[in-house]
Image: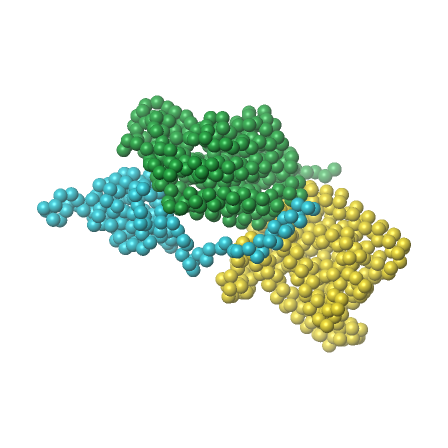
Amino acid sequence: MIRTEEMLLNVGPQHPSTHGVFRLVLKIDGEIITEARPVIGYLHRGTEKLAEDLQYTQIIPYTDRMDYLAAMTNNYVLCHAVETMMDLEIPERAEYLRIITMELGRIASHLVWWGTYLLDLGATSPFLYAFREREMIINMLNEISGGRLTFNYMRVGGVKWDAPEGWIEKVREFIPYMREQLKGYDQLVTGNEIFMNRVKGVGTYTKEDALNYSLSGANLRCTGIKWDLRKEEPYSIYDRFDFDVCIRDGGDAWARYHVRLSEIGESLKILEQAVEQFPSEGAVLGKVPKVIKPPKGEAFVRIESPRGEIGCYIASEGKKEPYRLKFRRPSFYNLQILPKLLVGQNMANLIAILGAIDIVLGEVDG
Amino acid sequence: MMEGLLAAEASWLNFGIFFLLAVVLLFVVLGFVTYAILAERKVMGFMQLRYGPNQVGGRFGLLQTVADVLKLLIKEDTIPKLADRPLFILAPVIAFTPAFMVLAVIPFTDKFYFADIGVGLLYYIAISGLTTIGIVTGGWASNNKYALMGGMRAAAQMISYEIPLVMSVIGIILLTGSLNLNDIVEAQKNGWFIIWQPIAFIVFLIAAVAELNRVPFDLPEAESELVAGFHVEYSGFRWAFFMLAEYVYMFAMASLITVIFLGGWLPLPFLGFIPGAVWFALKFTVVIFILIWFRVTFPRIRADQLMEFGWKVLLPVALANIFLTAILKELLNIF
Amino acid sequence: MLGLAKGLTYTLKNLTRKKLTYDYPHEPLPLPDRFRGIQKFYPEKCIVCNQCANICPTDCIQLTGKKHPDPNKRGKIIETYDINFEICILCDLCTEVCPTEAVIMTNNFELAEYSRDELFKDLVWLDENDENLRKVNKA
């Protein structure tokens, strides 16, 4: 009889595949994980506490830095919350610009996920192909907002800038191009047997687990639950667009992969319609008081970010600064299921499972 | 010339000549490694819509690897405090030496070879197996958990893939009736073994990629899982030695594939006026390109699937190939 | 095997495609006009209204003013104006609130320095930072 003993392995915070400063304390038996304890907080900047001393406009740049891969949705959730409290009217053109930029951000975010996930699984090329398309999106967003990642684009009551000349055309041209590239992605990765073997049946959970762990976004839809806030509780002008909610039944990494890739297609559909319906003129910033002071009270709004449901709770005392600001950050909630999924898996699956959850550490730590 | 030398009596002069030739070969191989790394980075870059190195040494980055090696040589040589010091120092040597030793039996052309051993193929496979010990030693001596896991993976992988590797060439040995690599090349005059033994070729190629620890079988150093695998604690020239061993193996393995499947220095029909060395270089380059091409395209296979694939797919296929070859040889009697 | 072959053809096709690398340090990056780079400051335009310092989310702007030297004129003129680029996040809010466009964004973004002290930019430095200015500063 060979005497074996469990080994404590520290994965991260500096590990190539933890997507930032995320740490996992693993107990492993050979390569099999018997216990996993995630340690977070290395990127905690106290956004919520800082916000209590900031005016609402000043908080917007901070939201850029939470989910830095899809900063537009973060911008939006804060503005949306304040607008809900103040009951503001948003100009049509601003709504369209918001939708277009948010959907572009969603595509960019899913592209980063696709590239980095394949990078985790050992394939180097998809990352660069994904970044080719992402770079085009980033350039477009840079042109409209002046920032490549931290857009600081939305304002309470509208958006900061109108679309520059020819920008809408660029988006229109991008849509068929992106569809073409998606086919290439399928050709390169989706049918690859090695890839299929690595993700099929890995990190599987049931519908009940998904609901109990409060998962959202692709992590929820991969179990077959049709829940997308853009459809269920249409905010902004999402009710004007015709698109499908992508679901799969497997509940494994393979299903999540498909949900995310087909979501890019759905976002392109929304973009196509939004560009078509885009009003030719109009203001981009509504009538907003010079100093934004939401009335006393509280509000909670939630929207669908690329990673799941992002919520924003504001408690106001009628002052320039919020009394309390709280974000429901989807990455943080989605990460909770990780220890459960890891038990009994090996090191290679650890990467495949963690990657498929799609966390952004800026959002997990807040 | 080589034939005469090999048949000559043992003397200090002959020893000197062989020593000199070996040194020349070493430099040729080092030159190859320098430019193989560059070629790999260039091809990878081009396939990934980048240019690859293009700053050091002109537009094509011709001196990039030289600069990298220079940097590695002057880097601080770190040895972890709790490492097993003698083994830690010894491991890169154990890993590198067999890589260079196997080159002795490769016939580059019908005139240019260093040894004409009867069991050339067996020698190659036996010696190349020794590198595993170096890798496991390095992984263990580092006193690092990632390195240990990388070392264990390397041991498991190299041992399991050596078996299909050997089994797949048995078909060729049956057809040739010799383990001598020169004879194997000569036997391909009526057609390369890639045509007579396609199954063996596929099995051999897969097993060879696994032996080389290259994508999709790069588990021992799987960057995204084990950070750097068995060489995680190595730096400077010790690390360079591991890398050197890896690329010298790439040279040796590509040469071996050329010799046993692609007809070595033999020309294509009607193109006999081109010298054999050119033919060898051409075929060799194609094999290297395929290895790089694999690296660009594929994700990494998982450890348990790797084992399953090796034992449950490759080995039975290789065994079946032996039977098939034996039956065909008996029935058709072509050789 | 089919999937593997498909992937191989995809990468092979890309071998000859146009490369996307920016020749960055040799050629400046093409940036849109709206790009938010290091601020340019016009001391003569500043009316010392303090709005930029107030709106700054990271409190990186410090300014002091003094009485106008010409006794006939009212108002203040700027004396010192410092931006601490260790904490500035280039959010554009200072230029958004500036009533006289005395502080505007440029397209310069290269801020690497050998010492942290050098990231503390004063009025003179910000005034001399007058290349690649942003043309449209107000939406």
Q: Residue at x 53, y 39 (%)?
A: A264
Question: Chain A drawn in what color?
Answer: green
Q: Which chain is cyan?
A: C
The quarter of the image holding the N terminus of chain B is: bottom right
x%, y% of residue B202?
74, 52
Quarter-of-image position of residue B116: bottom right
Is any part of residue A203 visible from this angle? Answer: no
Residue C66 horizontal side relative to residue B273, left or right = left
Tell me: residue B90, above or below residue C46: below
Kindly indicate the quadrant of the structure image that contains residue A92: top left
Q: Which residue occupies 22% across, 41% down?
A: C49
Q: Is residue B35 left or right of residue A153?
A: right
* Chain assigned yellow: B
Front residue (pair A94, A233):
A94
Front one among C94 and A272 = A272
Please give the name of the residue rendered at 72% of the width and 42% of the height, measured from the top-left corner.
Answer: B308
**Is B289 above or below relative to A112?**
below
Say if A248 sits above or below B335 in the image: above
> Could you tell whether A234 is left or right of B249 in the image?
left
Residue A83, how many percent across, how many down?
36, 29
Percent position of residue A181, x then y? 55, 46
